[in-house]
Amino acid sequence: MRLYLFEVREDEREPIARIAGRLGVEAVCSSDVPGLENAERVRGFDAVSVLGQGTIGRPLLEAYAGLGVRYLSTRTVGYDHIDLDAARALGIAVCSADYPPDGVADFTVMLILLCLRHYKQALWRGQVNDFSLQGLMGRDLSRLTVGVLGTGRVGTRVLKDLSGFGCRLLAYNRRENPEAARYARYVDLETLYRESDVITLHVPLTPETEHMINRETIAKMKDGVVLVNCARGELTDIDALVEGIETLKIGALGMDTVEGEQGIIHRDHRTDILANRNMFYLHQFRNVIMTQHMAFYTREAVESMVRCGIEGVAEMARTGGYRTRLV
């Protein structure tokens, strides 16, 4: 099998070479984002692997199918960047990746604590030898109610981790998870919004969940609510977040992902002009912590993502199935 991998980071190259060699896959790597302008490169390849910065829509999938591609893997857990209906119609088998939930869960708890203890402002002050305490009084997590939206593998792990802090835990999911129910009380969305001091998002991005955090839902939350997003940026309406911060309705934001980050994250833009004004406007607030979509980024997760990206297409070609096959 011949596999063309797009969006390859330097840290992926060693595991790609090792895993592809073990599976007998000929792998060609590129750091470029996939698009129609570079589709011709995959001529003669059986499979393509991507990350999440490009949109793999019908036109691109049609181009891939016409060039002989029959298998597609995304080295991400999320797959909202791929038109699965188009892939199905074109006969392209698609699989996603999986990795242990620990890294994202750890990062989520870290962001919650950083927000509650005003660490961004404390760090800035310390760098200029300002060791004052004014404005830095935090809150004890043990006295708060934390609402977890989404109780899949990551959300459930977050609940398990938070249970050790002694805080009251609420959860919402379309279907209850017995494991999550060991740590949290399932409630409806209205209750979770109304009673939570901290809300953290762990749902997939779908048409139903896009902008689920908006002006209307924020208005239902407590004054000073802390919002944390280590899932997908488009779960939140960035205009509503700006308004919430400006009016003090939102007490703090911990954001590893933000609406409109595509083409910005995971690159050095120190000398570039960037057009996402809301993203950078939010970034300057003392109570907004933004990281570069790195909650997933652990040695263990990268190894698993690369393995799924290569193993998935090889297994689909060999047997027709794979544990994370989507189409």
Image (tube, rainbow, N blue to C red):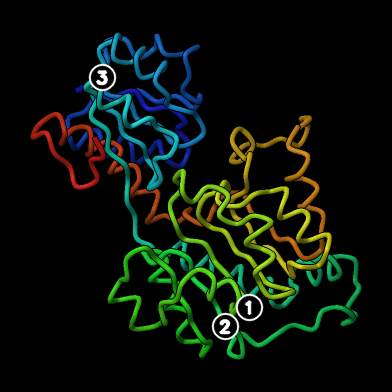
Depth order, front residue of 268/84: 84
Q: Amino acid at mark 1?
A: Asp
Q: CA distance from mark 3 to mark 2?
A: 48 Å
Depth order, front residue of 164/228: 228
169 with respect to 95 (left or right): right
Give the residue displayed 57% in from the left and 59% down from the top.
229
Dot placed on the residue nearer the N-terminal end, 3 or 2: 3
Q: CA distance from mark 3 to mark 1?
A: 47 Å
Q: What residue is disc 1 on? A: 197
174 versus 258 height, above or below:
below
Give the residue displayed 34% in from the left and 42% down from the top.
306
Dot placed on the residue nearer the N-terminal end, 2 or 1: 2
Q: Secondary structure at mark 3?
A: helix
Q: What residue is disc 2 on? A: 145
248 versus 241 height, above or below:
below
194 versus 100 height, above or below:
below
Contact between labelled residues 2 and 3, with CB atoms less than 8 Å apart = no
Q: Residue furthest left?
A: 319
Q: What residue is disc 3 on? A: 90
Q: Secondary structure at mark 1?
A: loop
Q: Secondary structure at mark 2?
A: strand
Q: Amino acid at mark 3?
A: Leu
Give the residue displayed 32% in from the left and 45% down from the top.
97
Contact between labelled residues 1 and 2, with CB atoms less than 8 Å apart = yes
Q: CA distance from mark 2 to mark 1?
A: 5 Å
Q: Amino acid at mark 2?
A: Thr
